[in-house]
Image (spheres, rainbow, N blue to C red):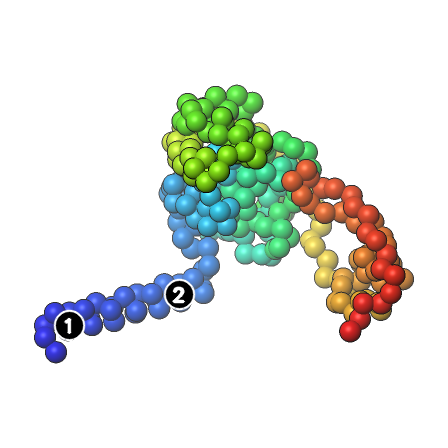
Amino acid sequence: MDSEMVGLSEMNTEQIFAEDRRIEDFKQNPRGEFLQAIREKDMARCLVKTAEIHGHFCPGSALGVMASVHGLNLLGLDSISSDGLEDLMAVVETNACFADGVQAVSGCTLGNNALVYRDLGRLAVTFAIRGKETGVRIRVQPDFSSSVAKASPEFYPLMEKVIKNREGGAREKAAFRKAGRQAAFGVIQLPFDELFAVETFRPLLPEYAPITESIVCSNCGEMIMATKTVGGLCFMCAGEAYRQVEGRGIVAKESERPSASTKS
């Protein structure tokens, strides 16, 4: 084996060991990279990681990133982060792009019950720690769109065409993604006080999420939470009304009672 092949082999081995160490670090602290970026107020790094779940770059998620980084630093979270045990809580007032910035950076999500969604349609988030007297609410200033337009003049016209009107083809969609990326990385470079207002107050938080019993629907045979049943039936089989989160917010829906059992 020549020296070049030996060098490549050693390099590959080092890369494998480095990746193994990285995986072990993630096992011990899955949010370690985020926490470091939050402490350093590295908005770009947080924005890039947020895009991993949001799917693209846009000013809305960028605003959520900025609000979260500053909010968590204001709370003094040098060592505390969301670990799914509901000690750190985030209350968002919109289900738009802003909310994904909050979920990614804070680690407070719907799935770990540390995220509360209030269907108010406002670009704002409140961070609080259970047992503490004071929480911090951060809201986006009403004139934020002018800052977005300066960062990316094409963003709003393209959003109107591609997203609102559902017009244009692949070229327009690519241009919109590019404009969104330009707007997002432009926004995070702006002074925080230019985009946000902050207030502190005593937060009103929900109780810890209960651990509920699971039962099997007597009609469809699916496992369901006991609190989501009517007479031993799931809402769908019982024809019961339910609520779902969608683009318009929390919407009441009517389910149709099945005509016959669907069990196999």
Residue occupying image coordinates x 46% and y 55%: 31
The amino acid marked with disc number 1 is Met
Quarter of the picture containing the N terminus is: bottom left
Task: State the residue in front, 202 or 264.
Answer: 264
List x then y, in percent, for residue 230.
87, 59
Residue 125 appears in which quarter of the rendering?
top right
Closer to the chain start, of discs 1 and 2, is 1
Q: In the rendered image, is residue 106 in sight?
A: no
The residue furthest front is 169
Residue 179 x, y percent position in the rendering: 42, 33
Mark 2 lies on residue: 23
In the displayed structure image, the side of residue 199 where residue 255 appears, left or right:
right
Say if residue 201 shows up in the picture.
Answer: yes
Report the number of discs.
2
Q: Residue at 40% across / 53% down in the picture?
A: 33
Query: Which one is in front, 70 or 112?
Result: 112
Q: Residue 145 versus residue 133: which sits nearer the camera?
A: 145
Q: Quadrant of the C terminus?
A: bottom right
User: 220 or 210: nearer the eye?
Assistant: 220
Q: What residue sits right under mark 1 in the picture?
A: 5
Q: Secondary structure at mark 1?
A: helix
Direction from residue 225 to residue 138 in the image, left or right: left
| Amino acid bearing label 2 | Ile
